[in-house]
Amino acid sequence: MSLADIKLNTAKRGFTIVELLIVVVVIAILAAITIVSYNGITNRANASASLSLANTWKKKIELFQAETGSYPYAIASFGTDTSKAYYIDNSSTITGVPATVVTKDNGTKRINLQACGKSSTAASDDASTGGVIISYWQYDKSPNAGLTTISVGTPGSSCANMAGQAS
């Protein structure tokens, strides 16, 4: 066998198993890094969206209180007058029904509103409502601590889910 034959045989040879395994391991590491980064970015975006929705409704509730002198006790309290600053435009689901709990799966588009009376006053008494509690899902917290609340006004201990739903 001549030197030319040896060079010809080595030129036709493919990749070794070790080389292929190294490529597979590198691709797996890059995929793992990408997946972890994507989940973190998604959680931060969802956290921002849910906080923005909750803050929007906090402002609407504060506008309602400034104009009417009391806090809303039902979704219908916001009315249908589009000239009001606190008008609900139905771009998101607002619920007072306990069955539709805010969860991680629906948290970017759903908040829960609770009307709270002053101390032991009934929450359905519009004039004496002490405030509203807004519950929303905060994605950038640990999975078991994601449900977060914002208080508007001075809610007492007697809170009730607001009746009605706008979707």
Image (cartoon, helix red, strand yellow):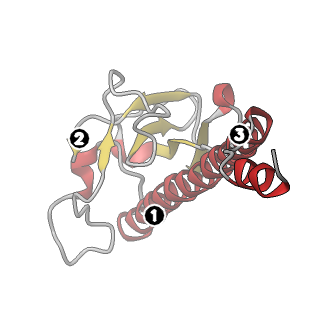
Q: Position of residue 138 (x, y in %)?
A: 60, 44
Residue 1 vertical placement versus 124 (above, below): below
Amino acid type, callout 2: Gln
Residue located 56% across and 57% down the image: 45
Mark-to-mark CA distance, 1 and 3: 54 Å
Work out whether residue 122 can be spotted. no
Residue located 56% across and 51% down the image: 42
Amino acid type, callout 1: Thr
Element type where label 1 sits in the image: helix
Please name whichever residue, 120 or 162, is drawn nearer the observer in this view of the structure.
162
Q: Do the residues labelled 2 and 3 touch (CB within 8 Å)?
A: no
**Image quarter of residue 3:** bottom right
Amino acid type, callout 3: Leu
Q: Residue furthest front?
A: 1
Q: Where is residue 163 in the image (x, y as percent from the top left)?
A: 27, 34
What residue is disc 1 on?
56
Could you tell which of marks 1 and 3 lies nearer the N-terminus? Answer: 3
Q: Position of residue 19 (x, y in %)?
A: 77, 42
Element type where label 3 sits in the image: helix
Q: Position of residue 78 (x, y in %)?
A: 26, 57
Mark-to-mark CA distance, 1 and 2: 17 Å
Q: Mark 1 packing: few (<14 Cα in 10 Å), some, or many (20+)?
A: few
Q: Which residue lies furthest to the top in this view?
A: 99
Could you tell which of marks 1 and 2 lies nearer the N-terminus? Answer: 1
What residue is disc 2 on?
165
Residue located 44% across and 48% down the image: 108
Q: Nearer the viewer, mark 1 or mark 3?
A: 3
Mark-to-mark CA distance, 2 and 3: 58 Å
